[in-house]
Each structure stands twice: as structure tokens, then as C-alpha cells.
Image: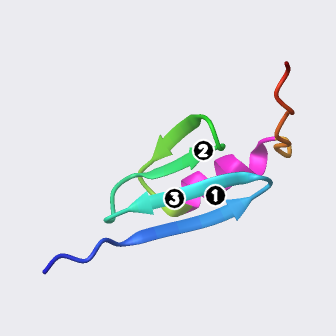
Amino acid sequence: MNTQAFTKISINGYHVLSVNSSDWKVCTKDDRLASFGSRQEALAYAASLPTYLARPKQA
């Protein structure tokens, strides 16, 4: 029986996540910004970005 391993960390409004020990991805709700081989690199990248604020949808 396989168990899915999902790790998610939020920093400055960005999501840093990894599924089944794959690359670490830095994402917003709608976009994947970058992928990294280590958690430290992904967290450093997310910390260097300006705070993410979701924009309201325009009609």
C-alpha cells in the first residue's frame, strides 16, 4: 500500500510544497513560480519575493 507524502509550507503568501519527495515548488494559488532541488533553496526564494496579495477578480 502506497502512502502519498505531501509537505506544504506557507511563507509571505506563497506555498512551498513537495509531493512524494520530489522537487520543491514555490507556488501561488494560480501559478507555479519555480522548482528547486532542496527545501532550503525553495524557502530562500519564497522569502526573497515581495509579499503576495491575491488580487480581486475584475468583472
The relative height of residue 59 versus residue 9 in the rendered view (above or below) is above
The relative height of residue 57 versus residue 6 in the rendered view (above or below) is above
Which residue is more in the foreground, 14 or 46? 14
- In the rendered image, residue 16, in percent from the top left (x then y), is placed at 58, 56
Which of discs 1 and 2 lies nearer the camera? The answer is 2
Q: Is residue 43 magenta?
A: yes
The disc labelled 3 sits on which kind of residue? Leu
Residue denoted by label 2:
27
Circle 2 Cα neighbour tier, 10 Å, few/some/many (<14 / 14–19 / ≥20): some
Residue denoted by label 3:
17
The disc labelled 1 sits on which kind of residue? Leu
Extent of the magenta region? 40-49
Which of discs 3 and 1 lies nearer the camera? The answer is 3
Earlier-in-chain disc, 1 versus 2: 2
Kindly check if marks 2 and 3 are in contact, taking CB atoms under 8 A apart as contact: yes
Give the total number of marks visible in the rendering: 3
Residue at 42% across / 69% down in the picture?
Answer: 6
Q: Is residue 35 left or right of residue 54?
A: left
Q: Main secondary structure of the magenta part?
A: helix
Q: Secondary structure at mark 1?
A: helix
Which residue is more in the foreground, 19 or 30? 30
